[in-house]
């Protein structure tokens, strides 16, 4: 007999209570319509339920979609129109881009190509511990553009490689020898993840949401393409990836610094895997083709007629993997995270869109703007303050998606109202949305996997996150400003 699974009572009570408080108790501000305020109540309750994990995020999102349709907050007195609005998120191409990209990433795991790439880099750079660290970083970087689940990339592909190397040198939490090299490698393993997530639209699930929010806020004069995002992130993030292992090496120096056996260990693993299979070659070819198409190479060579939408490119890639037999339809059906992503992205994008359409985001951004105006700051100082508040408020979030959905639109609108140029402000907030994952052991799904393996203490993890947050932000602002000016974005 199956058991009933109910929502967690405390988080559910808090989420429902917060929604009811905003809907019925807190007076609607003069500049806000009742419909916008009621949508805020539903949105806030949904975010609270997601943060508190009252139900899985997909389940919360289905409830949110149902409530938007039932309450008719978008179109009072028009149930058919309200239902259409509630389901409108599913027509967003960016949502399908990330969902399909998650399906494509299944091929990296199924064929073993992701693991093979990682061991090749370890074999190439693994004569010293810091070389192993850079091998992990390069492995992250190579597979990031086609792995929209940063948790799968850092936790399911790279982390097992890191653990096997550390264990091979007798560095294990179970033996109390994690400081030999495991602690250092675990911190590198994790801190590479937020940086690579910032580098590509398709490197972590919330990035397409950011693109959509920016386009909606600028109506849509600022529509960031895959190539523009990657180019803007290239230099500052490469600088971060170069410096990060060095900074952590100084903070948490490994006891074992020379690792002449690591190359042999990696080669032994590759020998066990055998030569690349046909499925791996096909997967590699499809991924390379997709990257060229996302980067706009066909359009550069053949003209605008050869340009494809990013979502169309993802559909082509998935179709090729299905037609060649690398993936079967059963693999797609089993890709639970892809279907889960489609549902919760659709719900959150829909609610965020109508918060803007109903005027709530404009009112909130004006409130932030007025608060900052009291400080008599110029737009440069005001922008820095906005980015810092947005970044470090991630200490209070266990989900980057919840954080971005709750705050990105309002902070972007406030910054532009204070005089910040839209393009650099958008890039700062967009890249900060991934970099802020570094702060805590719950900041994104990758964190509990690596932290839970026991190589670091809580104090060590938070100290590393605090230091890297400062280093990454300084590089983002300093190098980013120069790079974006050269690119003509400023």
Image: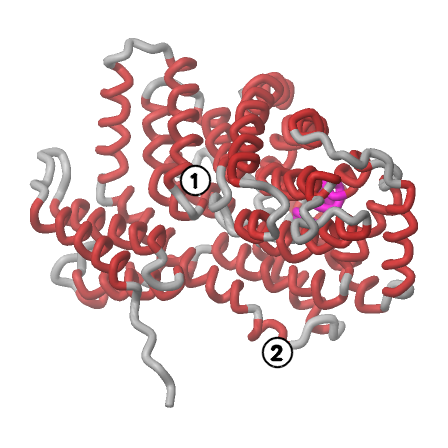
Cβ atoms at labels 1 and 2 below 8 Å apart: no
- In the rendered image, residue 271, in percent from the top left (x then y), is placed at 91, 61
Q: How many marks?
A: 2
Residue at screen point 30% across, 67% down: 7
Is 280 left, or right, of 310 in this rendering?
Answer: right
Left or right: 235 as drawn, with respect to 445: right
**In the image, is residue 217 above or below residue 476?**
below
Disc 1 from disc 2: Cα separation: 35 Å
Residue furthest front as drawn: 175
Q: Residue 352: tell me if it is visible.
A: yes
How would you rate the neighbour count of disc 1 (Cα within 10 Å): few for under 14, some for 14-19, many for 20 or more? some
Residue 12 image offset from top left, x and y in percent: 25, 60
Q: Nearer the viewer, residue 157 or 340?
A: 157
Q: Is residue 356 magenta?
A: no
Q: Does 472 appear above or below 193?
A: above
The stretch drawn in magenta includes residue 144: yes
Q: Quadrant of the C terminus?
A: top right
User: Quick check: 105 above or below 358?
Assistant: below
Q: Is residue 110 left or right of residue 94?
A: right
Q: Secondary structure at mark 2?
A: helix
For disc 1, the marked residue is 215
Asked whether residue 292 is in view, the answer is no
**Mark 2, residue position:** 330
Number of other residues with Cα within 10 Å of mark 2, as a class: few under 14, some 14 to 19, many 20 or more: few
How would you classify the magenta stretch by its main secondary structure?
A: helix
Where does residue 408 sit, x and y in percent of width and height?
39, 37
Q: Position of residue 283 (x, y in %)?
A: 76, 62
Of discs 1 and 2, which sits in the foreground?
2
Magenta residues span 136-145
Q: Which residue is pictured at 43% across the width and 26% down the height?
A: 387
- Give the camera-side residue of 180 and 220: 180
What residue is at 42 percent from the left and 37 percent from the top? Answer: 394
């Amino acid at each position: 007999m199956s058991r009933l699974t109910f929502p967690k009572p405390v988080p559910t009570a808090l989420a429902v209570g917060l929604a009811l408080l905003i809907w019925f108790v807190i007076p609607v501000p003069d500049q806000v319509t009742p419909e916008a305020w009621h949508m805020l109540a539903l949105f806030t309750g949904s975010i609270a339920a997601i943060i508190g994990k009252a139900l899985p995020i997909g389940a919360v999102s289905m409830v949110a979609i149902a409530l938007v349709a039932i309450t008719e907050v978008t179109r009072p007195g028009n149930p058919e129109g309200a239902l259409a609005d509630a389901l409108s998120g599913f027509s967003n191409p960016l949502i399908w881009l990330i969902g399909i990209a998650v399906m494509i990433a299944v091929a990296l795991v199924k064929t073993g190509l992701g693991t093979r790439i990682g061991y090749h880099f370890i074999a190439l750079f693994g004569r010293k511990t810091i070389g192993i660290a850079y091998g992990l970083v390069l492995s992250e970087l190579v597979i990031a553009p086609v792995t929209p689940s940063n948790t799968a990339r850092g936790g399911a592909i790279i982390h097992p490689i890191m653990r096997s190397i550390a264990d091979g040198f007798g560095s294990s939490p179970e033996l109390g020898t994690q400081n030999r090299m495991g602690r250092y490698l675990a911190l590198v393993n994790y801190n590479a993840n937020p940086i690579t997530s910032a580098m590509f639209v398709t490197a972590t699930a919330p990035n397409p949401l950011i693109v959509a929010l920016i386009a909606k806020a600028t109506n849509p004069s600022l529509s960031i393409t895959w190539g523009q995002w990657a180019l803007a992130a290239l230099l500052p993030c490469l600088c971060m990836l170069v410096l990060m292992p060095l900074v952590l090496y100084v903070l948490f120096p490994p006891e074992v610094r020379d690792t002449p056996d690591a190359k042999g260990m990696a080669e032994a693993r590759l020998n066990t895997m055998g030569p690349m299979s046909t499925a791996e070659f096909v997967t590699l070819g499809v991924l390379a083709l997709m990257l060229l198409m996302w980067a706009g190479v066909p359009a550069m060579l053949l003209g605008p007629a050869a340009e494809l939408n990013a979502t169309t490119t993802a559909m082509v890639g998935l179709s090729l993997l299905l037609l060649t037999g690398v993936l079967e339809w059963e693999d797609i059906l089993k890709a639970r995270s892809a279907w889960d992503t489609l549902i919760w992205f659709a719900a959150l994008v829909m609610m965020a869109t109508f918060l803007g359409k109903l005027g709530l985001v404009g009112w909130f951004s004006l409130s932030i703007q007025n608060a900052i105006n009291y400080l008599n700051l110029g737009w440069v100082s005001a922008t820095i303050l906005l980015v810092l508040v947005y970044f470090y408020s991630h200490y209070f979030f266990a989900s980057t998606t919840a954080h971005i959905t709750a705050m990105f639109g309002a902070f972007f609108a406030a910054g532009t109202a204070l005089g910040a140029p839209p393009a650099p402000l958008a890039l700062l907030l967009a890249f900060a949305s991934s970099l802020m994952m570094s702060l805590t052991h719950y900041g994104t799904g990758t964190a509990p996997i690596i932290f839970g393996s026991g190589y670091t203490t809580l104090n060590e993890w938070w100290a590393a996150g605090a230091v890297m947050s400062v280093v990454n932000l300084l590089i983002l602002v300093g190098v980013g400003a120069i790079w974006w000016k050269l690119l003509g974005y400023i």
